[in-house]
Image (cartoon, grey):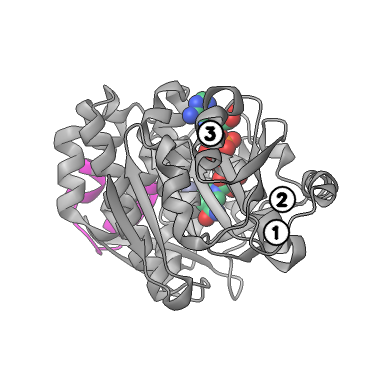
């Protein structure tokens, strides 16, 4: 089992990554002096596959978890779903050391994390991410929250878990499109912070796609290390954490412009990353090699890289991006593979049009 530590003073925590490690979670939680009762929050897709192993592992350490299911889907990452969970948790008579265990993808992790952050002003949170995106992104860094009907991730908190356990064996049941979405974020980490990792991905993409356990573990571990290093320097997203948004300015706009149905998040950011790299190249920030190799790797993974809508539609949707500051669109731009900078783009429409 590999361990990545997120070092945040008294809010530091370990991320354990391995294969067939679900049964270890109870034992790993022993050092947190948890009380004997807690809840497991999951959904009807993930629960039947993995709950039992988690419940028995906690049972063996003397902790009885009540399993609670939330229907599957982003629309249930809502205040209503959180309120329904409070209603079901209240009669269980939990105390301040009762753990909330999140078992599922990023939707369950964000929602259960929000409930853990708020119920009784905060209960210990254990994240067991089961999608690749959740293992490399949403479970790391402590952002928890829910959507409002008008805007995604609008209500939430920074609330670090006491432990994250990623079992890559869970990824075998993940739909391939969801797996590729996680890979888009993994490629992102190589581009923003680690050229050697990007090159390792170029050499090992086929192994990862074929489910090679060692390759998947290495890519999850390296991604968590990179995200942890960014979060350690900017826990509350006041500056440097913006680099994690590479590919997301255009990516979010594409998701909005295509009605959140045509493109998955991973597909949208794959296109967004290539656009950002090409704009960087055009501005003279990097060589042609950067967008070329990025596009080649994403295509090898099976992700799209071409713009599916007109630049006008993207720029219109970009106006609503949360990351808009001083009325300017800030882009994360590439200086090289493994090195980025954040800069405003004065005329995003012109920049996008010139790529055609
Ligand atoms: N908190 C953060 O920092 C952060 C970062 C990135 C994304 N997010 C959030 O994460 C969410 C997206 O996460 P996601 O991509 O994991 O989506 P998701 O949670 O909807 O999971 C995708 C699908 O895969 C299913 N699934 C999950 N694990 C499975 C498994 N092992 N086997 C079979 N099916 C499985 C889920 O039930 C769901 O149907 C969004 O709400 C996004 O806003 C949060
Ligand atoms: Zn993303």
State the separation of the CA atoms marked 1 and 3.
35 Å
Local packing at callout 1 (Cα closer than 10 Å; few below 14, some 14-19, many 20+) is few
Residue where numbered disc 2 is placed: 147
Residue nearer the viewer, 184 or 48:
48
Residue 33 seen in render: yes
Q: Residue at x 53, y 33 (%)?
A: 56
Residue nearer the viewer, 298 or 288:
298
Q: Is residue 292 magenta?
A: yes
State the separation of the CA atoms marked 1 and 2.
6 Å
Q: Position of residue 61 (x, y in %)?
A: 50, 45
Residue where numbered disc 1 is placed: 154
Q: Position of residue 310 (x, y in %)?
A: 54, 39
Is mark 2 in CB contact (under 8 Å) with mark 3? no
Determine which of the numbered discs, if any, sits on residue 355 in the image: none
State the separation of the CA atoms marked 2 and 3.
32 Å
Closer to the chain start, of discs 1 and 3, is: 3
Residue where numbered disc 3 is placed: 56
Is mark 1 in CB contact (under 8 Å) with mark 2? yes
Closer to the chain start, of discs 1 and 2, is: 2
Q: Which residues are magenta?
A: 272-293
The reply to whether the residue tagged 2 has its Cβ within 8 angstroms of ligand 1 is yes
Name the chief secondary structure element in magenta: helix
């Amino acid at each position: 089992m590999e361990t990545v530590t997120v070092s945040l003073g008294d809010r530091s925590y370990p991320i354990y990554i391995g294969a067939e490690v679900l049964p270890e979670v109870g034992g790993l939680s022993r050092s947190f002096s948890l009380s004997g009762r807690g809840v497991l929050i999951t959904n009807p897709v993930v629960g039947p596959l993995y709950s039992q192993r988690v419940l028995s592992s906690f049972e063996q350490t003397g902790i009885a978890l009540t399993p609670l299911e939330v229907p599957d889907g982003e629309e249930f990452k809502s205040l209503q779903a959180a309120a329904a969970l409070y209603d079901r948790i209240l009669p269980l008579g939990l105390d301040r050391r009762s753990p909330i265990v999140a078992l599922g993808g990023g939707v369950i992790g964000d929602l259960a994390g929000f409930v853990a952050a708020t119920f009784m002003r905060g209960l210990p949170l254990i994240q067991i991410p089961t999608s690749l995106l959740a293992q490399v992104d949403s479970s790391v860094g402590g952002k928890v929250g829910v959507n409002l009907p008008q805007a995604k991730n609008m209500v939430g908190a920074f609330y670090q878990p006491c432990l994250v356990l990623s079992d890559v064996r869970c990824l075998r049941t993940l739909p391939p499109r969801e797996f590729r979405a996680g890979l888009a974020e993994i490629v992102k980490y190589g581009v923003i912070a680690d050229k050697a990792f990007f090159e390792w991905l170029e050499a090992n993409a086929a192994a990862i796609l074929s489910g090679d356990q060692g390759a998947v573990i290495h890519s999850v571990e390296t991604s968590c290390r990179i995200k942890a290093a960014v979060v350690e320097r900017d826990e509350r997203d006041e500056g440097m954490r913006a680099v994690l948004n590479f590919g997301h300015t255009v990516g979010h706009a594409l998701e909005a412009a295509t009605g959140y149905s045509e493109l998955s998040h991973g597909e949208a950011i794959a296109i967004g990353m290539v656009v950002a790299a090409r704009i960087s190249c055009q501005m003279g920030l990097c060589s042609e090699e950067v967008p070329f190799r990025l596009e080649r790797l994403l295509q090898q993974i099976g992700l799209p890289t071409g713009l599916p809508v007109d630049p006008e539609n993207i720029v219109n949707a970009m106006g609503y991006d949360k990351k808009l500051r001083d009325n300017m669109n800030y882009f994360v731009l590439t200086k090289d593979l493994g090195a980025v900078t954040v800069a405003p783009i004065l005329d995003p429409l012109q920049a996008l049009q010139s790529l055609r």
